[in-house]
Amino acid sequence: MRCAPLCQFLWLWPYLSYVQAVPIGKVQDDTKTLIKTIVTRINDISHTQSVSSKQRVTGLDFIPGVHPVLSLSKMDQTLAIYQQILTSLPSRNMIQISNDLENLRDLLHLLASSKSCPLPWANGLDSLASLGSVLEASLYSTEVVALSRLQGSLQDMLQQLDLSPGC
């Protein structure tokens, strides 16, 4: 009776030893594909084409803009903020994009761990407590600006991934 766990482990050993790690190139390709998918989803929302990602809108300064050089940790932090903002918006489109951002953050964590720099999970912004009043006053503007800036940030991330960003 005492050898039962040992026997089970020995029986499973050939299967466990055969498991292979996912090649990092595949993870990077999946990350780029998911970014392109999110950008396409944003493009499919017609009203997001009307605002430049660089345009300043009073009261929406908490929405991150475009950053020229992004590390993996900065990418994760930026995505956490956008995810927090999008989950506050009532549109059905936001739920799918927010879920995609969560998956993208998971892929970024895999990329970071492959570089021996595991990322702490970013929580977004603590200062988004006032988001409710901003949404109440300008729901449409918040959605348009957030999606426009997210699209610009994702395109920058896509370019940065080609340059193999640091931790």
Image (tube, grey):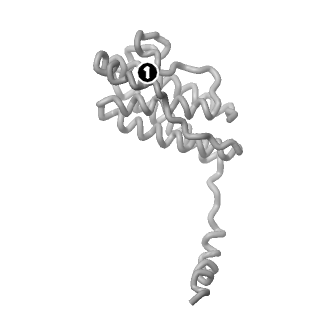
Q: Is residue 8 left or right of residue 117?
A: left
Residue pictured at 40% horizontal, 32% vertical: 41
Q: Position of residue 97 (x, y in %)?
A: 40, 35
* Count of all numbered marks drawn on residues in the image: 1
Q: Position of residue 164 (x, y in %)?
A: 68, 34
Q: Nearer the viewer, residue 50 or 135?
A: 135
Q: Is residue 96 left or right of residue 30?
A: left
Seen from this angle, which residue lies furthest bottom? 1
Q: Position of residue 24 (x, y in %)?
A: 65, 47
Occupied quadrant, residue 6? bottom right
Q: Is residue 159 above or below residue 13?
A: above
Occupied quadrant, residue 167? top right
Q: Position of residue 147 (x, y in %)?
A: 41, 24
Q: Amino acid under label 1?
A: Ser
- Which quarter of the figure is the N terminus placed in? bottom right
Q: Secondary structure at mark 1?
A: helix
Residue, disc 1: 148
Residue pictured at 61% horizontal, 84% vertical: 7
